[in-house]
Image (cartoon, grey):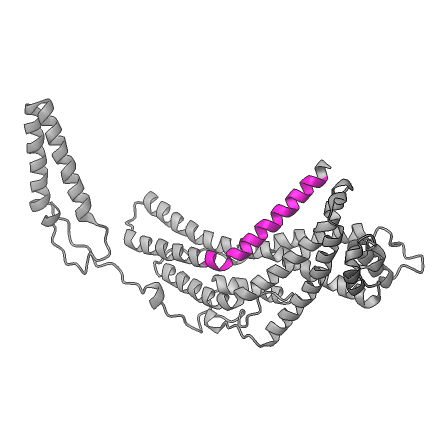
Amino acid sequence: MGGTVNVHSAVYGKMLKTNQIFSAGSKIFKRSGVTGKKILPYLMRQKKDKVKKMETQFSSNSQPPVPNPPRSRPFLNEQTLSISSNDPESFHCVMGPVLVMAQLFGILPVSGILMPSPLQIEFVKFSVRTIYSAFISGMVLFMATLSIIHMIKTLNSATFEVQEGIVTATSGAIFYANCVMGLIIFFWLSSRWVTLQRDWRSMELFIDSNKMERPKLRWKLYLIAASILFVALIEHILSILVHVKKYDWSGKSDNATFLNFLEIYCTSSHAFILEIHLLKNFDYFKTLEFLFSVKYNLALGIFIFIVSKLATFTWNFTDVFIAMVATGLAERYKTLNKYVISSISKHRPIDWSELREDYAVLSFMVKKVDNDISPIILLSFVNNLYFICLQLLKGLS
């Protein structure tokens, strides 16, 4: 039956395997005839005659007209990007302002993120951005080292017997170690981000050539980033207020100065760094205590205040970055689903071969993105899991 339709292979190069479908249908008819023969010969003969008549009509009188050739589209690896193209709804253009803000905190040091085309993005190993990012990472690494030393000195069996002892011993080390790893992973991602953005833009151009409605990413992604960062800012301000309860907010005393505010904040929130709060009961750590314990001074206070803000932003931006990338991909899937549902409801013809290509290209992009940002996802998952368990432990104890 499939041999009755004779169409040039160039026309049906991307169509579904119609021959297999019709062949399967013929087998069904044949099986139905055999079953009927076993049950009732009379009905079997009628069914065979009916099937034979349908096949004859399809092969001779009801041949479908030859459709127009499918619209040719360049494949993903053949897609050419234009430097002058500037689509404000493209993922590259939407991520630009957010990444500029992140680079102020030493995250993802790539250049050209505000340019109209991802072809203008580049990662230079020795540039102002990379040096600045390495400097920020070094500052946070120094704080993480002090925090880990404090955890090693205080984490023992007696720690679990003291209320919130496990929190005091481990929270600082986990927090700063997580931020250092985040900065290192984002630095590692910088070289891959260039290729990733170019492939992403090629995927967008390939799918948009199908003339379907493009997803509106700009305000949706900005709303996600603003919501998460605003809540994080409120939480951080409340955390600062908790650590400066002893500060005179009335301003009547002589100690109501910024220097006094800074000292109260540092000695309360980062007590593990200062010598007056270090434990003296571990003789085998005297060398480390001598090397790494210092007394509070203005320079140390400013350093602690700045580094804590850098680490806090990195900690929260990790979740923002994952949410924005995931939303950018999810909106593309929603657009494909919306197009199919809308076409079916309005009884419009659908070129399934093009939709299949779009889905395949999008699936390839998801795998590539997952391969590049999976370390960030794992880091965020482990960090959130730790602090959730820590809060549960505090609540139960």
Inspect the magenta stretch and tell me whether residue 389 lies in it. yes
**Is 372 on the left-hand or right-hand side of 245?**
left
- Name the residue at 14% across, 33% down: 31
Question: Residue 192: image x %, image y %?
Answer: 49, 66
**Is residue 184 shown left or right of residue 393?**
left
Residue 293's place in the image compared with 64, above or below, is below
Q: Quadrant of residue 249?
A: bottom right
Q: Main secondary structure of the magenta part?
A: helix
Q: Residue furthest front?
A: 284
The image quadrant where one finds the C terminus is top right
Magenta stretch encompasses residue 200: no
- The picture places residue 136, in percent across and down from the top left corner, at 66, 67
- The quadrant the N terminus occupies is top left
- The residue stretch that appears in magenta: 369-394
Q: Is residue 166 above or below residue 43?
A: below
Give coordinates of residue 212: x percent, y percent: 37, 55
In the rendered image, is residue 65 in sight? yes
